[in-house]
Amino acid sequence: MKNSENDVYQRAIVRAKRSITSLPFKRFFYERVDQTAMSAEELCSSVDWQQYVFVPFGKERAEEHFNWMIKLGILRREVDGQGLTSRIRLTPLGRKIIATIHGEIKRSGIRERIAETLRRHKANI
């Protein structure tokens, strides 16, 4: 990789790591979507949702989180014979980031989560 490409890649890693700690997903969620695809509906209707997330939320909010993580390069949509599906999987970048986090993902404080929400909003404008 050229230096400028490496710089962009390193900034992407920093941005994704920061976002992961601000998102409501536990390590088990990322491990699950590394092994098998999952949709927002499957996540939200799961009887053991507490294994996957710190706080409950609906399907629409889950999709918002998924779309943000897709933009960051952490997740990707699964593809079947007819194209993209509603199911997501972990990307190689996502795997690399999760591998650097030992134990459960420690959530950011409220101040950092608010700042991350503002960054997300700004990116979507």
Image (cartoon, rainbow, N blue to C red):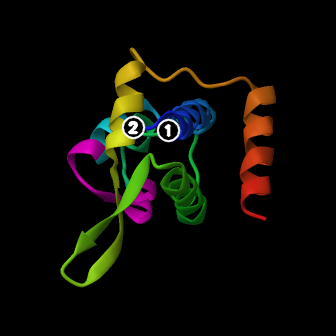
Extreme-left residue of the structure: 81
Amino acid marked by disc 1: Tyr
- What residue sits right under mark 1 in the picture? 9
Q: Is residue 91 above or below residue 97?
A: below
Residue at image point 60% right, 36% down: 15
- In the rendered image, which quarter is residue 84 located in? bottom left
- In the rendered image, which quarter is residue 60 located in? bottom right
Residues at badges 2 and 1 in contact (C-beta under 8 Å)? Answer: yes
Front in this rendered view, residue 98 or 64? 98
Q: Earlier in the sequence, mark 2 or mark 1?
A: 2
Which residues are the magenta region? 34-45
Q: Is residue 119 above or below residue 102?
A: below
Residue 41 position, x and y percent, is 42, 64
**Would residue 74 be found to the left or right of residue 119 on screen?**
left
Q: Is residue 25 above or below residue 70?
A: above
- Inspect this view and state whether residue 29 appears: no
**Secondary structure of the magenta portion, mostly?**
helix
- What residue sits right under mark 2 in the picture? 1
